[in-house]
Image (cartoon, rainbow, N blue to C red):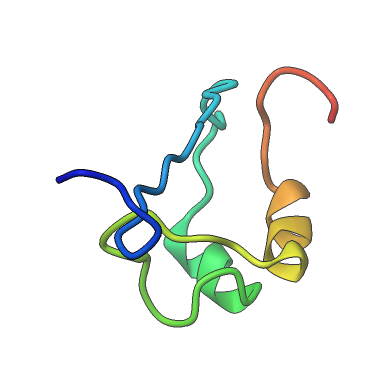
Amino acid sequence: MVPSPLSPVKMIDFLLVGHSQPSVPLSVLTSSGIFTNRPPQSIAELSEERYAALKQFLRLGFDF
């Protein structure tokens, strides 16, 4: 595939900062409204509101 204005290539830059320990249970993710009923099956974007709800459950070993 050759990128062009009619067929652009999208790049996503991910920075893995760590893994949440312990992991957040699916029941917590759904009851908090972060996921609707099940996790996405591919990469998905979280809205600012959903990310704000998720941050309180993340334990990455540092404050952010």
Rendered position, 54 above or below 60? below
Tell which residue pokes out farthest to the right in this image. 63
**Quarter location, residue 20:** top right
The x, y position of residue 8, in whole percent, is 36, 54
The x, y position of residue 52, in whole percent, is 78, 58
Looking at the figure, which quarter contains the N terminus? top left
Rendered position, 60 above or below 22? above
**Quarter location, residue 41:** bottom left
Q: What's the residue at 48%, 81% (across, down)?
A: 36
Q: What's the residue at 76%, 69% (across, down)?
A: 49
Q: What's the residue at 50%, 31% (across, down)?
A: 14
Rendered position, 3 above or below 5? above
Looking at the figure, which quarter contains the C terminus? top right
The x, y position of residue 21, in whole percent, is 55, 29
Instruction: Give the number of callouts.
Output: 0
Rendered position, 34 above or below 55? below
**Quarter location, residue 62:** top right
Tell which residue pokes out farthest to the front in this image. 5
Nearer to us in this view, 37 or 50? 50
The x, y position of residue 22, in whole percent, is 54, 34
Tell which residue pokes out farthest to the left in this image. 1
Nearer to us in this view, 48 or 7? 7
Q: Is residue 21 left or right of residue 39?
A: right
Nearer to us in this view, 45 or 25? 45
